[in-house]
Image: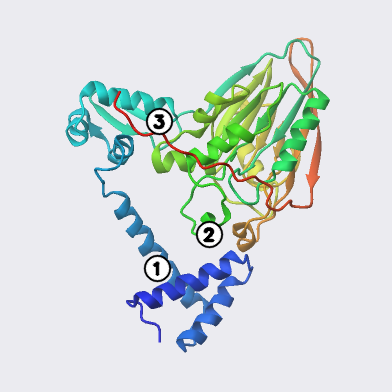
Amino acid sequence: MYDNSNKKHQKKVAEVFAKYKEDNKFDYLYKAADELNEYFEENLKMEGWRSRYRRLEEEYRNMNKKIAHKYNHNDSIEERLVAYLNQERTFDFLIEKLDISEMELLGYIYRMQSFGREILVMGDRVKLAKSPIKENTTTKIDFKGLKEIEVLVLGDTHIGNNHQQETYLKEAYKEAERRGVQFAIHTGDITDGQSNRPEQIYENFLHGADAQSQYVIDNYPKAPFPTYLLLGNHDSWFMKAGGTDIGKIISAQRPDIKYIGSGKARLEIGNVKIDVIHPGDGSNRTVSLALQTASSIVDDNDKPNVLVSGHHHRYAHFIERGIHCFECPALEGRTSFMTAKHLVNTMGYMFWKIKVDAKGNFISITDETIIKDEEIFNDYKIPEPIIKPKSFKI
């Protein structure tokens, strides 16, 4: 019989669930329950074993949090500083705990800010930002008197996940360059981020903000036109976990990738307004529902001409309240999370043609959507290990 306090029993439960999850079996909960009932000579329903497993997950998460907050004085000053700044601290507190001068502390803060850490300095107090700072921004683009503007639109590339579709991503940019597009829009989740979903770690070939952002910097297609990047919920997990703004990191080293914000941003080309959003909701069986909801709350006096959404991994185009609404397909294959949740996953990218008059006013938009039915497995290259430089006092 299963004993909840027995560490060997706990380990067995964790191993069985992990085994079936890794095999990406749709019915892994029932498979795991059958094996555990046989092993422990019980007759417990699937829901009972799932409940036991979830309690174990919660215990392990709490244990990891406690371990993460035990500061080792052999750790680098930057790592200890990040750990302390999970709470708001005074300069005096940090100077005493880190055994450095005020000038050295300011030097470390400036250095970390320059590498994408969002550290807020408020008088004599300091803390990590845990929510994206760039929200609801407006970026103006010169339409240069063009009568027709062609745009590449893509998103949900989830770089760092085993199911990323790098071949299709490069194909999209190659075709965009051939067509002579003016710019590209990325609708969010450029990286896969790092969540507390236990299965995610097994589906990532890159872990952490450093590794995933560096892969983007090194491998995201380079083009003669700019890509306007919105961050999505996966990208923002790095901000919530440790105050790292990967949009800032990527755009600092890739001038062709313009970071326009997180969650929602507006692009203005002449008098054409394009709202780009990446909501944090779930997917719906009715593909248009999320966009209909989003368009219904737009202010009548500030309506965009075009509204495009990432996140849902679907394709749609319809007109609501005079707004051209688009769901942008993804460039990621089907993950175990999608399978478990019965989620539809549409892969592909879009080309828009926007017609404007001589004054830059919106006339019309047409789209050509390239849908990809076949996932390319293991479509990535393992990068060389990132070797961090030793910390030093400034």
Where does label 1 land, which residue?
Answer: 56
Q: Nearer the viewer, residue 268 or 253?
A: 253
Callouts 1 and 3 close, C-beta under 8 Å? no
| In the image: residue 299, left or right of residue 154 | left
- The scheme the figure's colours follow is rainbow
Name the residue carrying label 3: 118
Q: Residue at x 80, y 22 (%)?
A: 180
In this rendered view, identify the residue nearer to me: 248 or 136.
248
Who comes first in sequence, dot 2 or dot 3? 3
> Residue under circle 2?
199
State the residue at coordinates (60%, 30%). Answer: 229
Residue at x-position 33% and y-position 53%: 65
Measure the alpha-carbon separation of dots 2 and 1: 14 Å
Few, some or many C-alpha atoms within 10 Å of disc 2 (few <14, some 14-19, many ≥20)?
some
Percent x, y of residue 17: 51, 70
User: Does 311 sit above or below residue 368?
Assistant: below
Q: Please give left or right for residue 392 compared with residue 265 in the image.
A: left
Which mark, by number, is residue 126? Answer: none
Crowd class of label 3 (few under 14; some 14 to 19; many from 20; radius 10 Å): many
Mark pair 1, 3: CA separation: 33 Å
Type of residue at label 3? Glu
Q: Is residue 391 above or below residue 23?
A: above
Q: Which structural element holds mark 2? A: loop
Is label 3 in a helix, a strand or a loop?
loop
Callout 2, which amino acid?
Glu
- Ranked by sequence position, the earlier of labels 1 and 3 is 1
State how many labels appear.
Answer: 3
Q: Is 139 above or below relative to 193?
A: above
Relative depth, front residue between 323 and 31: 31
| SS at circle 1 | helix
Horizontally, residue 65 falls left or right of residue 238, namely left
